[in-house]
Amino acid sequence: MLDRLMRSAAALALMGGAALAAEDSITIGMVLEPPGLDPTAGAAAAIDEVVYANVFEGLTRFGPDGSVRPALAESWDVAEDGKVYTFHLRTGVTFHDGTAMDGEDVKFSLDRARAEDSANAQKALFAGIESVEVTDPQTVKVTLTAPDGNFPFNMAWGDAVIVAPETIADAATHPVGTGPFRFTGWTQGDRVEIERNPDYWGEPVAITKATFRFISDPTAAFAAMMAGDVDAFPNFPAPETLAQLAADPRFKVIVGSTEGETILAMNNRQPPLDDVRVREAIAHAINRQEIIDGAMFGYGTPIGTHFAPHNPDYVDLTSISAYDPEKSKTLLAEAGVADLKLRLALPPPTYARRGGEIVAAQLAAVGIQTEITNVEWAQWLEQVFKGKDFDLTIVSHTEPADINIYARPDYYFQYARPDFVALMDRLTLTTDTSDRSAILKEAQEMIARDHVNGYLFQLAKTGVADARIEGLWENSPTQANDLTAVRWTE
């Protein structure tokens, strides 16, 4: 009887969802709430999950297949020396406050991102810019210090969106962009709301209103889907329920790949983790498949380096850090380490909290004790990412093709081996595809053999949606819930 009542309640809730569908609105579930809504001043993936391609746009953008496409720049030319990019901007583009977007806004955005006091989390994307010149309101010339065939790719990141000087100060709480949706409200701890921009320069979107609801608890996420409180959950945190949802004709399960290298990050300058033998011991203590099965219910691909398996330049290096607990014990003895206790900071995502418990048990089996601390996302960003106050943490790096972060001396796991930095410098100057591939493969092997981090798995994109919704991304070439092609069907 109770089961029938629950099914009836779910059906009524779904009817409510159908009414929303008729109004062309949608509610999207997200695990994490963004700490702010300015993608040019924050590292959290949740920022882009709300605003990328929806509220903010860049000169270029990523398509759902990972390709780089025109956005605010309808085209661009590259000088023969590969150092000068001339971007031709679209006409008739306005910000959500009604002011025109032109070359001066592009110059402001790029100069701000590359400034010495820039708070941009991906400042390296702009490091090669020598100057930005506005030749006329619709044309911007960017001169680089060296050739970089990857520059249009860099400009597609969420960190490179175009903003206006008049509104950037309040962007964290009231973002003003040029996108097909405009920001309407943020109820902190619960939701962000956006609505269709009637003055959008491009093709109007089908959705008139979108709400992003923040539900980190897997059980609550499942209940929200079943009750119709959420129409789609593109990164669903309860993989153990996917089979049940897939069997229900009201829903469809969307499984794809992401750019999310999930790692057991180690503080490479914190003794004894500054000893490669200790880091290697930790790596060999990890049973990747056990983590994938136990934390992700089988969804995920084992990785042995910081590179996406679907990338054509990926090298399978899992054998370098294969599960071998006896080798772990031997390495710890060689390093003279006994009774080791390390701090393990776990942010809210399911892969971290559930995976962290499994990792802790695996490390304990080789004699390494862990003190687990569950931290909220804002605390993780402040303490771990910015403050580097940690020993171990588990996080998924969802930025596209981001192996270059290992060359940054101030990055939170603090590696930046000079040989690796030199490799990344060579990569920037290399345009030949085969040569770039060779450098990337060498880079993957270097960090794998240095055991910079414990490489766990590539995060699968496991999404759930109302069966009538079309246009959600199957894969995640960047961290985004792009709603520009989403629509309801009958």
Image (tube, rainbow, N blue to C red):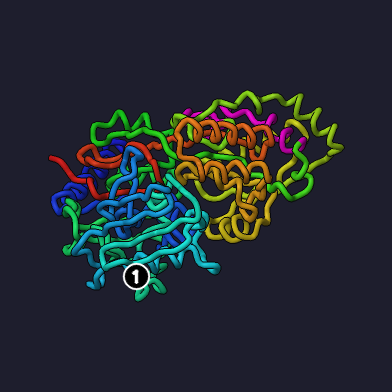
In the picture of the structure, the residue carrying the numbered disc 1 is 164
Does the rendering let one see residue 457? yes
* In the image, residue 349 above or below residue 312: below
Quadrant of the snapshot with the N terminus: top left
* In the image, residue 463 above or below residue 179: above
Give the percent coordinates (x, y) of residue 304. Answer: 59, 30
Give the percent coordinates (x, y) of residue 340. Answer: 79, 42
Dividing the picture into quadrants, the one containing residue 234 is: top left
* In the image, residue 320 above or below residue 270: above
- Residue 316 is left or right of residue 257, and the answer is right
Which element type, helix, strand or loop, lies under badge 1?
loop
| Span of residues in magenta | 277-303
Q: Residue furthest right?
A: 336
Does the rendering let one see residue 353? no
- Residue 275 is left or right of residue 286, and the answer is right
- Residue 237 is left or right of residue 250, and the answer is right
Q: Residue furthest front?
A: 80
The amino acid type of the residue labelled 1 equals Ala
Question: Which residue is more in the foreground, 206 or 249?
Answer: 206
**Chief secondary structure of the magenta span?**
helix
Is 48 a magenta residue?
no
Q: Residue at x 51, y 45 (%)?
A: 428
Is 285 a magenta residue?
yes
Q: Residue furthest bottom?
A: 166
- Residue 54 is left or right of residue 190, and the answer is left
Q: Residue at x 13, y 50 (%)?
A: 22
Give the percent coordinates (x, y) of residue 336. Answer: 87, 37
Dividing the picture into quadrants, the one containing residue 462 is: top left
Q: Residue at x 23, y 37 (%)?
A: 467
Quadrant of the snapshot with the C terminus: top left
